Image (tube, rainbow, N blue to C red):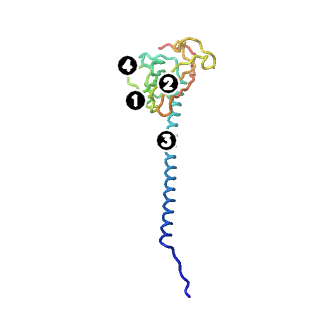
Amino acid sequence: MMQQRRGFTLVEVLVTVVIMAVIGLASASVINAIMRTSEQSETAIARLEKLQYSMLILEQDIRQIVARDNPTGRYIFIEEGRLGFVRSGWFNPLGLFPRSELQPVAYLVREGNLVREHFNFVDVTESSEPKSRVVLEGVTAFTAKPLKRGAVQGQTPTSRDNNDIEGLPPALEITIETESWGTITRVFLINDGGLNEQPSP
């Protein structure tokens, strides 16, 4: 007698198709969740890198502050919502560029961004326009406060006003209000802090 051949019934095929569809949908959902998490992680890492880079720029500038007046009065040391100073160490190899190694710099908030301004020359006129670049996005407020030597060394500072400091302070306390990270407060040391102010030429 011929052996009977048995195949799959329509119900079995439909059940298999439904199971495969459910597995496919679950896999797609898992893959989409992984992709969204990866995108969010990359975005967070990129924002963190920008924040770290902005802190590095601030630290490099503040560390090299020198006691040098700007005759225009536009870049004073501390001002409401603005930090202005003259820094040294602006690389000029063999004096190839027609400028010194001093650079007037200012930080301020403009249109929701922390902006760094600088001039090519220390002694400029009021008509000179600074060069600007965005250091950090999503900034709502920016304040700077000079610290006294006792505060930096962990001692009780004197009762003098923060602005009543002879020469350069030993450090600056920078507070930045951001939309993404909240309030950020950092203390940056000044290399020449405590030296007497140099007269303008």
Measuring 49% from the left and 17% from the top, which residue is drawn there? 68
Look at mark 2 in the image and give the residue it sits on.
101
Q: Mark 3 vs mark 1: which is more N-terminal?
A: 3
Q: Mark 4 vs mark 3: which is more N-terminal?
A: 3
Q: Where is residue 44 in the image (x, y as percent from the top left)?
A: 51, 40
Q: Residues within 10 Å of mark 2 (few under 14, many from 20)?
A: some
Look at mark 1 in the image and give the residue it sits on.
111
Identify residue type, mark 4: Glu
Q: The residue tagged with tag 4: helix, strand or loop?
A: loop
Identify residue type, mark 3: Thr
Q: Can residue 93 be seen in this view?
A: no
Q: Position of residue 20 (x, y in %)?
A: 50, 63
Q: Mark 1 vs mark 2: which is more N-terminal?
A: 2
Q: Is residue 150 left or right of residue 175?
A: right
- The answer to whether the residue labelled 4 contacts the one labelled 1, judged by CB atoms less than 8 Å apart, is no
Q: Can residue 87 be seen in this view?
A: yes
Q: Residues within 10 Å of mark 3 (few under 14, many from 20)?
A: few
Q: Residues within 10 Å of mark 4 (few under 14, many from 20)?
A: few
Q: Residue furthest front?
A: 11
Q: The residue tagged with tag 1: helix, strand or loop?
A: loop
Look at mark 3 in the image and give the residue it sits on.
43
Identify residue type, mark 1: Glu
Q: Considering depth in this image, is 192 or 158 the residue closer to the camera?
A: 158
Identify residue type, mark 2: Glu
- The answer to whether the residue labelled 2 contacts the one labelled 3, judged by CB atoms less than 8 Å apart, is no
Closer to us: mark 4 or mark 2? Answer: 4
Q: Which residue lies furthest to the left in this view?
A: 127
Closer to us: mark 2 or mark 3? Answer: 3
Closer to us: mark 1 or mark 2? Answer: 1
C-alpha separation, residue under disc 4 versus residue under disc 3: 41 Å
